[in-house]
Image (cartoon, grey):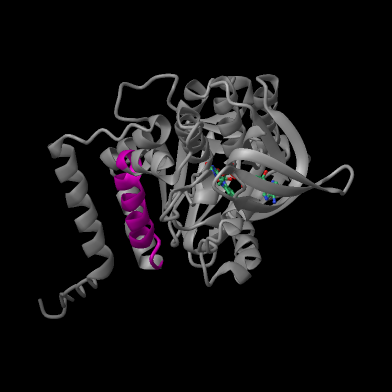
Amino acid sequence: MDEVLVVGASVGGSTAAETLVRAGVPVVLLERDLARVKPCGGAVPPVAFKEFDIPERLISRKVHHALVHSPSERTVAIDVIGTRPHSDDDYIAMCCREEFDQFLRNRAVERGATLIEGQLLSVAVDAKGVTSTYREKASGEVRTLRTTAVIGADGAYSPTARALGLPNLPRCVAIQERIRLPADKMARWEDTADLYLGAEVSPDLYAWAFPKKDHVAVGMGAGQGHTKAARQHLENLKQRIAPELAGGEIILQEAHALPMHPRPQMAFDRAMLVGDAAGLVVATSGEGIYWAMKSAKLAAEVLADNIANPSAAQLMRYQRTWWKNYGTMYRFLRWLQKWGYGGERQMEVFTDMCRNRDVQRLTFESYMHKNMAPMPWLAQMRMTGDIIAAQVRHYVPARPRRLVSSIGG
Ligand SMILES: Cc1cc2nc3c(=O)[nH]c(=O)nc-3n(C[C@H](O)[C@H](O)[C@H](O)COP(=O)(O)OP(=O)(O)OC[C@H]3O[C@@H](n4cnc5c(N)ncnc54)[C@H](O)[C@@H]3O)c2cc1C
């Protein structure tokens, strides 16, 4: 009996597999399509490179500035700096998933994981183990695997979760085009990533332009109820920034679902879910790469510790630890998404909030370094004051100016 089946060899699955083999647990890593490139903006926090020992050569472009564009085209320029003294570690890494995922997958295999290209068909858990079937890609044949446990790292549609009898998660859709630009146009995105707000480009999330070495990835997210119009919204974005994209050539169009909520349960008897399969994308930003890797590592460590008895009671340590460490952040970012993207007027308030230096520094500190240190109370007061002022400014109608008659006097 192989010890663990990991389903999905993307960022989450490869990290889980590598963690397990390093702990001495044999792993089969099952991926339905090794040639597929995960649709993704590819923004990765710098902490991921240190924490997961990933070489910086996989960074296609380092970005040190961001522009936030409000629905009425007011623009806020932000330096990518956290709350600690400015250093070379302050940037957003822009990566191409075809390179990033392949590195993680190859490393897991080099360290001992057995990689199979095939599509998971079924999973059945019993008292002594897990029986899974998959269709092998090369032969087309259905094969059976018997393992001690299974980790589902198989994305937003998670066939593993479905096989465990779990419902589908609420999902949004994100679509993107990679556009290769002439050198003079590419210079615009030399060191800057853009966020666009507005009902015509993304009614309830945001749109973006994320630069890579030789192209810019232009995309948008659409929540439930808006997914059918996603392509039109992307066209609207391209119209809005048409002069900046002039002469560009579309080299790839991509779209995929993102989970909108974490699953209430992520650990079961002999089974665990990580990354998008567990719904661990954070709201507001749609960031999921780091969280898929982080959850996969934690799940694999807990499983390795309990491989002799992988009961739900033992594996629940993964879920408890996760929510103890990150519950507040997920709840806050969910609230921020609803508050900040809830209509165009609110998006204007959100843009104003981005002007505040303390908000900028706190946001990038927590994004880049995953450091959730509380701000000094004075900064908190300044931020709160600014946000209330912006809220009032955009909702209280401006008083009509008194006309002063010049006649007669
Ligand atoms: C357009 C778009 C832009 C995004 N931009 C960003 C960004 O800039 N930064 C960021 O951090 N996040 C971004 N995300 C989110 C990020 O892509 C995901 O959160 C992340 O890839 C999740 O990793 P994962 O390993 O959990 O799942 P996935 O990357 O989805 O991988 C799941 C794997 O499982 C495999 N699989 C599925 N079914 C089966 C089966 N039946 N049998 C075998 N294998 C199977 C798939 O082929 C795939 O390789 C974006 C998402 C989208 C859609």
| Residue 358 rendering spot, x and y as whole percentages | 26, 38
- Image position, residue 111 (x, y; %): 65, 19
Quadrant location of residue 394? bottom left
Q: Quadrant of residue 21?
A: top right
Q: Magenta segment, which residues?
A: 324-343
Seen from the viewer's position, the closer of residues 30 and 234 is 30
- Residue ID at (70%, 31%): 102
For the point 11% across and 80% down, which residue is it? 408
Q: Is residue 217 visible in the rendered structure shown here?
A: yes
Q: Is residue 259 left or right of residue 321?
A: right
Q: Is residue 297 left or right of residue 316?
A: right
Quadrant where the N terminus sits is top right
> In terms of secondary structure, what is the magenta stretch mainly?
helix
Q: Residue furthest right?
A: 139
Residue in front for this viewpoint, 107 or 62: 107
Q: Is residue 332 magenta?
A: yes
Q: Position of residue 30 (x, y in %)?
A: 70, 40
Q: Position of residue 143 (x, y in %)?
A: 79, 46
Which residue in the rendered view is the most extreme toward the bottom? 408
Q: Is residue 301 left or right of residue 118?
A: left
Q: Is residue 302 left or right of residue 181?
A: left
Residue that protrudes farthest toward the front in the picture: 128
Question: Total label count?
Answer: 0
Task: Report the residue at 62% width, 47% height from top.
Answer: 154
The extreme left residue here reads 409
Residue 10 in sight = no
Tell me the quadrant of the picture where the C terminus can be found. Answer: bottom left
Q: Is residue 247 magenta?
A: no
Q: Nearer the viewer, residue 84 or 400?
A: 84
